Image (tube, rainbow, N blue to C red):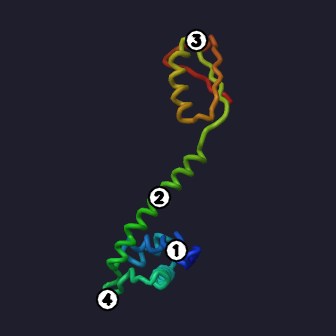
Amino acid sequence: MTITTTSNSKPQLSWNDLKVFHAFAQTGSINSAARHLDVDNSTVSRRLQDLEKQSGVMLVERTSNGYRLTREGSELKQLVNGMAEGAGNIHQWLKEKESVLSGRLTLSCCDISMPRLSTLIRYFQEQHPDTQFTIEPVRHLHDSGLTVLISQ
């Protein structure tokens, strides 16, 4: 278990340690949490025990039928669920940032298509502000709907 301390010496648990607790709390079993995390059952058990030892709070009650969260464990589950949701939001945000479109696009279209095309370009640039467009009118494209050639 990784613990860092701040200037006032209060321990701070790492997200990696809390992920094991989260997996257990979501699935309700050591086996399911281990499968979800792709680790051994003993790793999940040890991490849960370490978390309890470091925090000084009993989070999981061991019963003859298996394991269940204590009242404190249920409270921590709610907090960790919020952390997991936040981590998911960060992951999604980073994924969106890596797929940002940018650069120059040249569109060739017939004159009659240009008014309709400008609305689409405006919408596209709102979604992808790092793009620039050049529109080149051509006469050999036929206006059947909206015919466009796109090149880089």
Q: CA distance from mark 4 to mark 2?
A: 35 Å
Mark 3, Cα crowd under 10 Å, few <14 / some 14-19 / many 20+, is: some
Residue 10 x, y percent position in the rendering: 52, 77
Q: Give the distance between the C-alpha atoms of the residues marked 1 and 2, in whole angstroms.
A: 16 Å
Tell me whether the residue at label 3 lies in contact with that at label 4, contact meaning CB atoms closer than 8 angstroms.
no
Q: Assign the C terminus to one quadrant of the image.
A: top right
Q: Amino acid at mark 4?
A: Ser
The secondary element bearing badge 4 is classed as loop
| Image quadrant in which the N terminus is located | bottom right
Callout 2 secondary element: helix
Q: In the rendered structure, which amino acid carries the disc numbered 1?
A: Leu
Query: How busy is the neighbourhood of tag 2: few (under 14 within 10 Å), some, or many (20 plus)?
Result: few
The three-letter amino acid code for the residue at tag 3 is Asp
Badge number at residue 86: 2
Q: Residues within 10 Å of mark 4 (few under 14, many from 20)?
A: few
Q: Is 82 situated left or right of 8 in this image? A: left
Earlier along the polypeptide chain: callout 4 or callout 1? 1
Q: Amino acid at mark 2?
A: Gly
Residue where numbered disc 1 is placed: 13
Counting residues from the start of the chain, the first of labels 3 and 4 encountered is: 4
Cβ atoms under marks 4 and 1 closer than 8 Å: no
C-alpha span from label 4 to label 1:
29 Å
Q: Residue at x 39, y 72 (%)?
A: 76
Mark linked to residue 97: none
Q: Mark 4 or mark 2: which comes first in sequence?
A: 4
Q: Are marks 2 and 3 in contact (CB under 8 Å)?
A: no
Q: Residues within 10 Å of mark 1 (few under 14, many from 20)?
A: some
Which residue is disc 3 drawn over? 111
Secondary structure found at label 3: helix
Residue 64's label in the rendered image is 4
